[in-house]
Image (cartoon, rainbow, N blue to C red):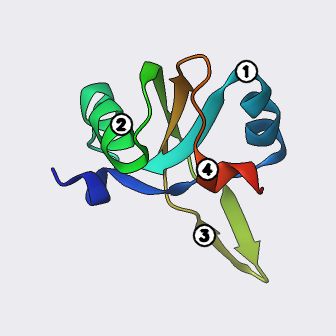
Amino acid sequence: MDIYQVIKEPHTTEKATHQREFNQVSFKVHPRSNKIEIRQAVEALFGTKVLEVKTLNVKGKRRRMGRNTGKKADWKKAIVTLAPGEKIQAFEGM
């Protein structure tokens, strides 16, 4: 799988911002990608050393629009722990 298909977008929430203190970054990733592919993609795209990758499948929430009910899509999240002293410049301004 191509590295640009593995990582879809950064996941920025209040919790993800707090995790940056511990040198961790969150990404939305392709649902069929594995930890090895995610590690290689982050190292290639951002030029950083990755210590650990944790993945979890997030279930989509049920939503209502008037009388109609629907469901948001399920997605996969990766929490990447960077080596000490490593930073991703794109996340520094957030």
Q: Which amino acid lies under the numbered mark 2 shown in the image of this protein? A: Glu
Residue beneath disc 2: 43
Q: Amino acid at mark 1?
A: Phe
Q: Which residue is mark 1?
A: 22
Front in this rendered view, residue 56 or 9: 9
Residue position marked by numbered label 3 in the rendering: 70
Where is residue 61 drawn, in percent x and y? 65, 54
The secondary structure type at the circle numbered 3 is strand
Of the two numbered discs 2 and 1 on the same chain, state the one appearing first in sequence.
Answer: 1
Pointers 4 and 2 in contact (C-beta within 8 Å): no
Q: Nearer the viewer, mark 3 or mark 4?
A: 4
Element class at badge 1: helix
The C terminus lies in quadrant: bottom right
Q: Secondary structure at mark 4?
A: helix
Disc 1 to disc 3, C-alpha distance: 36 Å
Question: Who's the residue at 36% across and 50% down the image?
Answer: 45
Please report the residue visible at 60 percent of the width from the left and 36 percent of the height from the top.
87
| Residue underneath mark 4 | 89
Q: Is residue 54 above or below residue 40?
A: above
Query: Quadrant location of residue 39?
Result: top left
**Marks 2 and 3, how far apart at CA:** 37 Å
- For marks 4 and 1, give the CA distance: 16 Å
Question: Could you say which is closer to the camera, residue 40 or residue 16?
Answer: 40
Dot 3 amino acid type: Gly
- Give 15 or 43, whichever is nearer the viewer: 43
Give the percent coordinates (x, y) of residue 4.
29, 59
